[in-house]
Image (cartoon, rainbow, N blue to C red):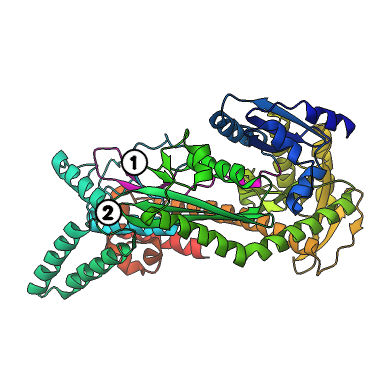
Amino acid sequence: MSELKEKLKTLPRKPGVYLHKDKEGKVIYVGKAINLFNRVNSYFRGAHDYKTTKLVSNIADFDYIVTKSEKEALILEYNLIKEYDPKYNIVFKDDKSYPYILIKDCKEPYVSVVRLKKKSRYKGKLYGPFPDVGAARNMVELINKLYPTRKCENLKKELCLYYHIGQCPGYCRIDIPEKDSERVKNEIMDFLGGDNRKILSDLKEKMNDAVEKLDYENAAIYRDLMDDVRQTSQKQDVQKNNRESFDVFNYHSEDGYIAITGLFVKNGRLLSSDKFIDYLVSDPVNFVTSYIYHFYEINELPKKLYVPKELYDYLKDVYDCASVTRGYKYQLLKQAENNCIEQLKQNRSIITNKENYNEQLDQEFRRIFNKPVSTIELFDNSHTGGTNTVGAMVVYKDFKPSKKDYRLFKLEESADDLSSMKEMLYRRYFRVLKDDLERPDLLIVDGARIQIDIAKEILSSLNMDITIAGLGKDEHHNTSYLMNADYEIIDIRKDSNLFFFLSNMQDEVHRFAITYHKKLRKKAMYKSVLDDVKGLGPKSRMKLLRKYKTIAKIRELSLEELKSVLSSKTAEELYNKLREEDA
């Protein structure tokens, strides 16, 4: 500790980034500072909240990098967090991207829902962000009903089902005038921009025309579409007769907690919001500016960003931003702040309980394995009679599922469960060794002694030292006990947090494996039904789908009904094949 104190005295009073490290030299926190000397020393002076106290207790050393400006420090901090994935920078670990609607830059009008993992990835015009993927998909579904858009991601070589049911003019095979495609694109852009007058006028005209022809069924469809259009337009107006687009961010910190709220205004309408709450492990301004920078590295930059004065001073060289003290934009800033206050009031106890839960798990794993356990990998496999054999690995970091690290394995067919487990473990840890990936603190196999022996054999063959455990089940296939590498059954109370956590992990890996297995089985089933029936070519398949829409409906047909569409021989082949699949 004396060496650390001496090192603290040498810190420069300049902007830069600091990296806190634990006793093993692993980076556990990355932060930025306008004044490195003041900021880093503040961790070792006075009292702190719970989370910061825990961080400080694990700091054995630190490093720092001086930068030319606060802007450079902000960018460097972001890149170092992505590189080191520090434990106490949890808020910035996951790419938090919102769904957008993309009008693709292609000849035909084509709309889709995307997430901006990389801002330069998509070519076209983006609209959003939307509050959730469901809202974005509903909007795309409505657009596809209203306009003659291209439905296929890649153009087919023949007219598809969308053409035959009247939802696509046939861009793949029919030469559509470019001016017509551009007109449709412009109408869609107007609609997404908030101008629904043109589409409502067209729908009303079609509805009235249908009524005159006594076509009440289509008239009802046009009426319902008009209701859908009006409903999507019922967003909150920010200011009458104002079509500006901008974002607002504000925050509130209290008793070691922080809440952040972003409001996104598009064409004068409050479209969606971003909300965050957690423990505070830095000073509020540093924390919030880092959060905003991370957010816009993933999401689309606004035309203008409005923030409080203290954030503006830090962000003015990074974004086109401003701070206001009156008017409706100031009212939005206050609205965002009030949202933060309300978040803290309602959700602070949830975070505290969650932290207490994690602390108890940490103590239990330390008791059992005599070491801290941060990263856990758990394996399971699934198959049907030796076919479509798959394996799954789920990863938990700091007792939370890290879904970006989950992995699926397509395994050798007809292998037994033990051989499948052996293949999966070898492939996983050979890759870890080959690519020098992060090794878990604990490897758990879904099984007991035999599966543990397999894990030992694989790790030994690769000369890897990873702690192993197995999850045993009772006769009802429920989680029953934990066994260590020495085949000792660990005593765990059935009502404890640890038992609950292990059960959830086991359910999660089983769900992940089964979902993949079902997907492969369904794909294989559909392929065999449609592609493996002798005499059932592409035209016949299309004929069936045009008439009956889905395979489920085709499955319900009698042999005579199939013969009305197909030749007798082909109908019998398909009928028998469908019965085989149902057996």
Q: Is residue 265 above or below residue 298?
A: below
Q: Amino acid at mark 1?
A: Asn
- Tell me if 369 is positioned left or right of 258 in this view: right
Residue 275: x %, y % from top left: 53, 56
Q: Report if residue 481 lies within the magenta region.
A: no
Count numbered badges in the picture: 2
State the residue at coordinates (71%, 57%).
505
- Which residue is under mark 1? 154
- Which residue is under mark 2? 242
Q: Report if residue 100 lies within the magenta region.
A: yes
Magenta stretch in the rendered image: 87-115
Check disc 2: other Cα within 10 Å, few if <14, some if 14-19, many if 20+. Answer: few
Nearer to me, 533 or 185: 185
Residue 179: x %, y % from top left: 14, 41
From this viewpoint, is residue 46 visible?
yes
Secondary structure beneath label 1: loop
